[in-house]
Image: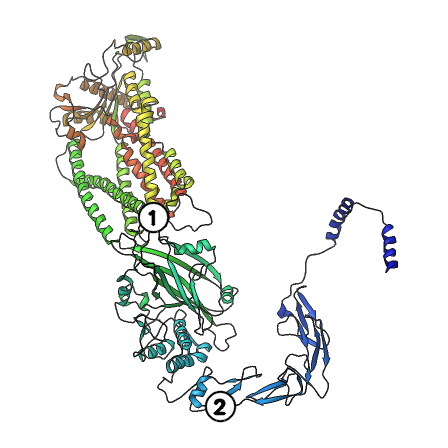
Amino acid sequence: MATGGGGAGVAMAAWPTLSAAALTALLLLALPRVLQAQTFSLPFRQPESCSHNQYFDISALSCVPCGANQRQDAGGTSCVCLPGFQMISNNGGSVVICKKCPENMKGVTEDGWNCISCPGGLTAEGKCSCPTGHILVERDVNGTLLSQATCKLCDGNENSFTIANALGNRCVRCEPTFVNTSRSCACSEPNILTGGLCFSSTGNFPPRVISAARYGELGMSLTSEWFSKYLQSSAAACWVYANLTSCQALGNMCVMNMNSYDLATFDACRLFQFIFENTAGLRTVHSVSFWRQNLPWLFYGDQLGLAPQVLSTTPLPTNFSFKGQNQNTKLKFVAASYDIRGHFLKWQTLEGGILQLCPDTETRLNAAYSFGTTYQQNCEIPVSKILTDFPTPVFYDVFLEYTDENQHQYIWAVPVLNLNLQHNKLFVNQDSSSAKWLLTRRIFLVDAVSGRENDLRGQPRVIRIATQISLSSIHLVPNTKNGNIYPPLITIAYSDIDINDPNLQSMKVSFSVNYEMNQGEAHVQTDIALGVLGGLAVLLSLLKTAGWKRRIGSPMIDLQTVMKFLVYYAGDLANVFFIITAGMGLYWLIFFKAQKSVSVLLPTPAQEERFITYVGCAFALKALQFLQKLISQVTIDIFFIDWERPKGKVLKAVEGEGGVRSATVPVSIWRTYFVANEWNEIQTVRKINPLFQVLTVIFFLEVVGFKNLALMDPSSSLSRSPSSYIAPYSRILRYAVSSALWLVIGIIQIMFFAVFYERFIEDKIRQFVDLCCMSNISVFLLSHRCFGYYVHGRSVHGHADTNMEEMNMNLKREAENLCSQRGLVPNTDGQTFQIAVSSQMRQHYDRIHETLTRKNGPARLLSSSASTFEQSIKAYHTMNKFLGSFIDHVHKEMDYFIKDKLLLERILGMEFMEPMDKSIFYNDEGYSFSSVLYYGNEATLLIFDLLFFCVVDLACQNFILAAFLTYLQQEIFRFIRNTVGQRNLASKTLVDQRFLI
């Protein structure tokens, strides 16, 4: 030892001494070369690919040869000795040593460690075999190995009643049904042997049993191996011996057949019904007439009209509340679970995704049972995963746990609506009338057993999956103030899958929870509001039509009058629908989100259809009103009266005569062009900024989180955790939140515009009036045949076409009150008027205007003949002179007078007096000529934009897309309004359109 140690020390000393850092550096330098020389690729092997003399090495993940005299074991991951060889040692894998047995002891013991002489033949594994009814004995009572094995016959006599067990190594007592039926361990004829049980043939049990599993969705049935083995035995044990497990197993087989039965076939459910009907003398369980002693509760009965009574007669004796001390927001579902053989497994809560096939986090799965939260879960699952996760079905009887006023715990049975149930070959549960439904109790998720035809260990031919599970019809009790509900209903639909390749097949599954309340009273209230407001809209439209008839100077009721009434009524009815929908939306938003004890629940998507129809009507009618206003604005008659007069005369050359002559100084047209251009600019001025409106609404919805108020859950929080469940959106709440934000932001903008912006920054309407006065231009505007507006812009200084010095002097004199006031009436400031002109004046205006617009505007005039152009110029000057003289009271036969409107006239928006002989100028301090501009129709535009935004959002459920399309339509209509308005302005005033910017 010492020498060995010294040698090692000498060898070590031969190496130069290196520090740890140096060694580390050397290793790091060598590592890349080592890695380059290696490969990380290896053959892919599976345990079943190994041959019979190989085993799968779980460490090397490859097939490794077994040792001498060995073969692969049943698991494939180790080796065992060949028949006729005993084990000497076994350390797993191939570390097995085998030794051949001697000629006089060719058998091997059951554990494989010893050789033994057999009394008879050998099995394929080299073990001793015994005749039927015998057991193999290899050891003494104290464990001593016998030199020769013996076969012992089990005593089947009355004192023992024993028989060999399935392994053939122990005598056990016979199954009780054998003893009871034949007083022996044999079930000889005429007794019936089925499912390992023995029954007497003299009983009144139905002899003919159908072992078919029906798959209505595939339109097929097959002979189920499970039913063939256990249906008759389970039914017989349940009927004859009242065996609880057998009764549960029979009930399970009925549920596997979708609780379907008809009177002509003795299948699982018919057998269950037979036993139920013939045990009427037994007592019921918990006083439930459908729950017979010893039997599972599968049905609620088949009487017509029973389902509505079960679902909506007796409320649950518990209350639900969202807030407060007695907060109760959990639906505590529990289930009694059973295996396929009828054994009770346990009570378990449904939380944790017991009924939810789709995988998810526990938080999101448990959100399904938060009261008031609409829950939806969808996914697609491979069939191979379903077969792996659910080799045998588990059956659930679902109850709702609650606590009464005395804090005692109770459970309430939850009914099931199986959509696949067939009663006498009819799918009664798919009927729209609940009176025809047949409610059941027990459910399962996956059945991969009944679809096995010949071998219960093989792959099933058909499997049945619960693809749609819905906790539906959680109804709020009408007029409740304490959060009372009727019993919930589990609606379940199964899909049958014909198995071809499980790895390639998949199935879509869903789980949902829906809440509902009776909307009858809400519909009545809505209809009343719609009727009352609709009636008021009719009256208002009649008043508007009467005012319009007076303004066009036509007393006759004709088709045009009817059409105008319908247009007015469309606009007013749109406002009615908008008020109703906004009110409904805010009602649900406020009362649902803010309530403590639950008294209201959100409408279901089906119940929202009426609301969506109202929103669609509001948008369509408002769009019609908007288009009507747009058309009326671009077809007005307008003329700019130039009050400027020539300043003296000038010498002018006469074309073609070679001489000169004196002529008046021409009046500049640029002032008219300038005013016309300003008028064109204010045509689409609004009291709000459309871009700011859209961006602000999106900011509050998407960034601040107001959109979370539209989720179908009771939470009023603006932020949600990414890990929490996000409920689907309610269309009513989306409409309520977006319309409320749109209105609030729009009203704030309008108030800011009126209170601050127009006072301290810029008021384009008043600036236009000032510009007219500074330019010595008046605006004569007719929006109807005999009604319009007049902006008096006549300069108090006589001239506006002057130099800078004189202009400044005029402004200074006006500021110091050294000149008269700007008003049409002396010593007044009134410059804007509503005008009702007489028919005579309008006829005279039309005669001149016809000549002015004969060629449809300046663009045609530029290419027309000189004589036509001169004629139009002459008509322009004639119109200018006529309107100027009309304002100056020159035409006594077409005179006018000025008055104030009555308060009622202002409220109704109409005039009581008709301009018979004289026209009427109404003082207008509100600048109501803006009604022919966007500026005066802000309410219509705001509501139209709001409805457009909401309709797009309701259609696509996307606020950002709705905002983009809303802004896009605003710009499109603004462009159309400007373009068509420019053409109309150029046509009516002889202003060249090229000068309008």
Could you tell which of marks 2 and 1 lies nearer the N-terminus? 2
Give the residue at the far left of this rendering: 917
Q: How many badges with numbers are in the image?
A: 2
Q: Nearer the viewer, residue 961 or 974?
A: 961
Residue position marked by numbered label 1 in the rendering: 324
Which image quarter: residue 129?
A: bottom right
Where in the figure is residue 504, as x and y percent of width and height? 51, 64
Residue position marked by numbered label 2 in the rendering: 159
Which image quarter: residue 912?
A: top left
State whether residue 862 appears in this view: no
State whether residue 376 appears in this view: yes
526 is higher (above) or lower (below) than 88: above
Where in the figure is residue 753, as x and y percent of width and height? 32, 28
Using a 10 Å C-alpha cutoff, classify the residue at mark 1 as few (fewer than 14 neighbours), some (14 to 19) or many (20 or more).
Answer: few
Q: Is residue 286 left or right of residue 551?
A: right
Using a 10 Å C-alpha cutoff, classify the residue at mark 2 as few (fewer than 14 neighbours), some (14 to 19) or many (20 or more).
Answer: few
Disc 2, SS? loop
Q: Nearer the viewer, mark 2 or mark 1?
A: 2
Which amino acid, mark 2? Asn
Which image quarter: residue 297?
A: bottom left
Q: Nearer the viewer, residue 185 or 508?
A: 185
How was this image coloured? rainbow
Q: CA gap, disc 2 to disc 1?
A: 71 Å
Which amino acid, mark 1? Gly
Disc 1, SS? loop
Where in the figure is residue 476, as x and y percent of width and height? 29, 56
**Quarter of the image with the C terminus in it:** top left
Report if the CB atoms under discs 2 and 1 are less than 8 Å apart: no
Where in the figure is residue 169, as x and y percent of width and height? 58, 83
**Quarter of the image with the N terminus in it:** bottom right
